[in-house]
Image: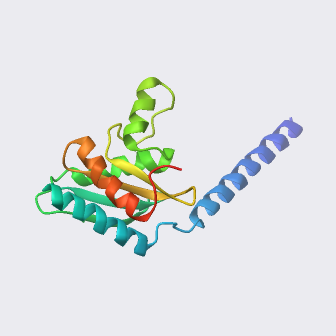
Amino acid sequence: MANRFHRYAMSLLFLLASTATFTQAAENDPSRMTYALATTAMAAAEAYAREQGWNVTILITDQSNNPVMLRRLDGAGARTFSFATAKAVAVTATGLTSGEYGIRVAAGDIEEVEGAVTFAGGVPVYRNGQLIGAVSTSGVRANQDEEVSIAGAEAIGSTSQ
């Protein structure tokens, strides 16, 4: 009985230690999306949206889905922030565009991510093959949101590895 308890206690301690190490590693992972990169991406995305006459919300996050920059253009709907955020969740959790994430979820290829949406508008940003963050847009049709996000992402990197 004592031996079983000892094994249980040791397993629990090992699990807690590994969880703490993982959490600490994630917290110590510096943001790869710098303010300068986010500024460049935001300028490109906003310019594209304005050229099209679209009133949108644009969100730029780092690889851990921490917001780096947000812009809600005049006339953008009240819920656009929530949708832009959910698109960024899909992107940073999977490294896929939010539209591709939706296609793969529907096909049963991947599991749903809590808090993510399955329609286009969020794109990953890769530099040197590494995910540095996401650009997500909401406010017009999903494919139009994605156009705005791509304009921002391509200004500082690429949307695929």
| Position in image of residue 153 (x %, y %) | 39, 58
User: Is residue 78 visible to the viewer in this orientation of the structure?
Assistant: yes
Between residue 16 and residue 43, name the one nearer to us: 43
User: Is residue 115 visible to the viewer in this orientation of the structure?
Assistant: no
The residue located at (21%, 58%) in the rendering is 49
Q: Residue furthest top?
A: 107
| Position in image of residue 69 (x %, y %) | 34, 67
Left or right of 63: which side holds 87? left
Q: How is the image coloured?
A: rainbow
- Is residue 59 placed above or below 87 in the rendered structure? below
Between residue 77 and residue 33, name the one nearer to us: 33
The residue located at (78%, 41%) in the rendering is 8
- Is residue 152 placed above or below 108 in the rendered structure? below
Q: Quadrant of the N terminus?
A: top right
Q: How many marks?
A: 0
Q: Residue furthest bottom?
A: 36
| Position in image of residue 19 (x %, y %) | 66, 52
| Position in image of residue 27 (x %, y %) | 57, 64
Please identify the quarter of the rendering in which residue 143 is found: top left
- Is residue 150 placed above or below 96 in the rendered structure? below
Left or right of 140: which side holds 119? right
Between residue 50 and residue 5, name the one nearer to us: 50
The residue located at (28%, 61%) in the rendering is 45
Please identify the quarter of the rendering in which residue 152 is found: bottom left
Q: Residue furthest right?
A: 3
